[in-house]
C-alpha cells in the first residue's frame, strides 16, 4: 500500500466506496421487494406444477407411502402376536404385587409394616387357626391356609372364591369375625380386600389339592355348592 501512487489510492478508495454503495443499494432494494410481496399463508399458496408433481415429488411421496405401508404390515401383526404374552406377563406382575401386599396385610401393623391389618391376631401367627375369647366365650378360628378346601375343611368352610371374598368383606354373623370392607362399615377398601384374597389363594394353592380347591377350581366350587342328597 505504501508503494501505491496518490492516483492509485484515489482510484481504490473510489472503487471501494462504489462497491459499498452498490451493496447497500442492493440490500435495500431486496428488502423492499420482500416487503412488497403479499404475505400469503402457506396453505393458500399455489401448489407445485404438474411436471413437479408427476415426477420427483410424486415419486418421493409414493416411495414413503410404500415404506410406511410395509412398516405397518410388519409391525401390527407382531404387536398382535405378542399382546397375549405381554398381557399375561403384566397380569402376573400385578398379581405378584397383590400377593406381597396381602402377605403384609395379614401381619400386625407396625412401623416397618404400614400395610398390616392383623389377621394373625385371631387366626394365629401362621394363619393356621387359634382360639380366642370374645364376649366371655371361647371361639376356634378357622385355618386360613386350607380354607379353600371347601367342605373338607370342616368349620366355617367356604364354598367358592366369592364366598371367601364376601366372608372377609361382610364378616360372619354370630362369630367374632367382623366385616372388613368399608361397604359394610369396615376399615378396608376394595384393593386391600383383593390383596388379602389373592394372598390366601396363593397360600391355599400350596396346601389344598387342585381338585378340592374351590377358590381356583370351578368344578370343585360347583360340587361344594351342590347339596348332598339326604340318606
Image: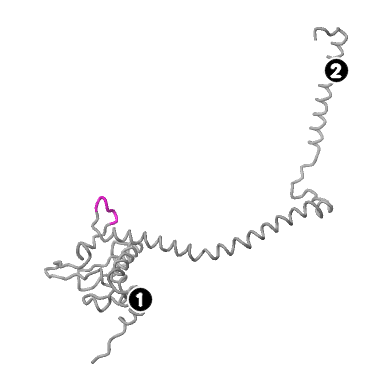
Q: How many marks?
A: 2
Tell me the tag on residue 93: none
Name the spot of residue 90 as percent of width and height, x first: 44, 61
C-alpha separation, residue under disc 2 versus residue under disc 1: 102 Å
Q: Residue at x 15, y 66 (%)?
A: 132
Camera-side mark, 2 or 1: 1
Q: Which quadrant holds the C terminus?
A: bottom left
Q: Residue at x 77, y 54 (%)?
A: 59
> Colour scheme used in the picture?
one colour
Q: Which is nearer the eye, 3 or 28? A: 3
Q: Which quadrant of the view contains residue 179?
A: bottom left
Name the spot of residue 156 as percent of width and height, x first: 23, 75
29 over 156 or under it: above or below:
above
Chief SS of the magenta region: loop
Residue 178 vs residue 191: left or right? left
> Label 2 belongs to which residue?
15
Name the spot of residue 130 as percent of width and height, x first: 17, 67
Report the span colored magenta: 110-115
Tell me the tag on residue 217: 1
Q: Which quadrant holds the N terminus?
A: top right
Q: Which is nearer the eye, 89 or 184? A: 89
Amino acid at each position: 500500500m505504501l508503494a501505491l501512487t496518490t492516483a492509485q489510492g484515489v482510484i481504490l478508495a473510489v472503487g471501494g466506496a462504489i462497491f459499498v454503495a452498490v451493496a447497500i443499494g442492493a440490500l435495500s432494494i431486496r428488502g423492499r421487494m420482500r416487503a412488497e410481496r403479499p404475505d400469503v399463508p402457506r396453505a393458500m399458496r399455489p401448489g407445485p406444477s404438474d411436471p413437479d408433481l408427476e415426477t420427483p415429488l410424486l415419486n418421493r411421496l409414493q416411495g414413503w407411502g410404500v415404506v410406511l405401508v410395509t412398516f405397518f404390515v410388519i409391525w401390527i401383526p407382531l404387536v398382535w402376536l405378542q399382546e397375549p404374552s405381554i398381557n399375561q406377563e403384566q397380569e402376573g406382575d400385578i398379581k405378584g404385587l397383590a400377593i406381597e401386599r396381602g402377605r403384609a396385610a395379614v401381619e400386625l401393623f407396625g412401623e416397618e409394616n404400614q400395610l398390616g391389618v392383623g389377621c394373625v391376631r385371631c387366626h394365629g401367627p401362621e394363619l393356621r387357626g387359634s382360639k380366642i375369647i370374645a364376649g366371655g366365650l371361647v371361639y376356634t378360628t378357622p385355618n386360613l391356609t386350607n380354607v379353600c378346601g371347601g367342605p373338607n375343611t370342616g368349620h366355617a368352610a367356604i364354598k367358592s372364591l366369592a364366598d371367601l371374598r364376601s366372608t372377609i368383606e361382610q364378616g360372619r354373623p354370630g362369630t367374632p369375625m367382623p366385616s372388613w370392607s368399608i361397604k359394610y362399615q369396615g376399615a378396608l377398601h376394595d384393593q386391600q380386600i383383593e390383596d388379602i384374597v389373592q394372598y390366601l389363594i396363593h397360600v391355599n394353592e400350596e396346601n389344598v389339592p387342585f381338585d378340592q380347591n374351590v377358590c381356583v377350581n370351578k368344578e370343585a366350587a360347583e360340587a361344594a355348592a351342590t347339596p348332598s342328597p339326604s340318606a
